[in-house]
Image: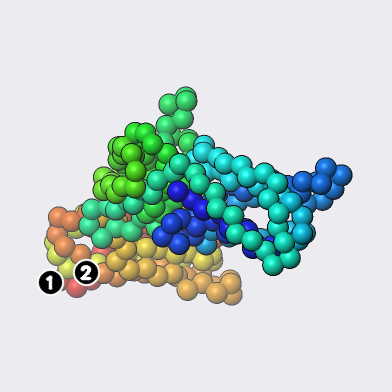
Amino acid sequence: EIRLSLVGSEICIRDWDNRGADDIEVEFEFDDVYNRYQRSYYSAYTNEYGEYTAYVAPSKRYTMRAEYNGVSNVIRGRYIGTAGTTINFALPLYKVSLTAKGQQSLGSVSWYTLDSYGDWDRYLGSGSVLYLKKGTYQIRGTYGMMVYTATITVNGNTSATVNSAIDQSKVDATLTTDGLVSLEMDSYTSYYLKYTPGETGTYTFSSSAVDEYLYGELYNDQYSELTSDSNGYDYDAVEKELQLSYSLQAGKTYYLRLYCEGTRDIDFSVSKTVAE
């Protein structure tokens, strides 16, 4: 269940664990037919704390509606005094707690299920908690190179472990030791390079010098970030290289995420710098 509280000028929606529920659509309407549009709010969404703030005239009656994941409820003609009031909305939604194998965080994952056309376009929510009505769902989430999937049956509050895999279709090129890869990089777009060392040791990933801010993040085969750095470009028109060093294990696969603030053709390489 989701509850909604209206106190003064603030609408707050929280679950029964007092956790802020974000992306809840809220509508409320001043019941005076002659002035209703002066105090009406539509398609308002709560923030990450479950809050939405608006100007509300006190000592008036309001009709309020909350909707989430296709489930809605309306309370009509509720009086809001100068001291505010609390209004509980009951929605037949249940809390679904999600975890991934290993130490992977789901905090930034956006979740979708299949729409009527068979596409993964029906948005369910984000993070490690979803609110769903009863039913069975195929869910799919993405973050960076990772794809998370699960089939969940909801009959009440429940928990589920999602499967995870790296989406190899996002790999733009594969690096080889002392080889060279050229990328035509668009501004503020992520690119991914893949590398599997033949020997254990410390390796350095390098770029050609560019007169734009260039940033890199190195991940292991579980998409856990190992290290990150930038080329240190400070808009002084001096071209600078990106260099990222880390100890790698033979036979393990690593992924280098890159993005640049400008559109540039940039060369990348990797070389072994310290043997182990």
Q: Name which residue lies at 43% across and 46% down.
A: 131
Q: Which residue is mark 1?
A: 276
Find residue 238 and report its horizontal and vertical position in percent.
Answer: 54, 73
Find residue 83 and report its horizontal and vertical position in percent.
Answer: 69, 67
At label 2, the amino acid type is Ser
Count of picture labels: 2
* Chain-order first, disc 2 or disc 1: 2
Q: Name which residue lies at 54% across and 49% down.
A: 89
Q: Are marks 2 and 1 in contact (CB under 8 Å)?
A: yes
Compared to residue 63, the image places residue 104 above or below, namely: below
Q: Is residue 260 left or right of residue 218?
A: right
Q: Which residue is mark 2?
A: 247
Q: If the image is split into quadrants, where does the C terminus sit?
A: bottom left
At label 1, the amino acid type is Glu
Closer to us: mark 2 or mark 1? 2
Compared to residue 92, the image places residue 48 above or below, namely: below
Q: Name which residue lies at 40% across and 45% down.
A: 94
Q: Of residues 47 and 182, which is closer to you in this image?
A: 47
Find residue 62 and report its horizontal and vertical position in percent.
Answer: 71, 50
> Separation of disc 2 and disc 1 at Cα?
9 Å
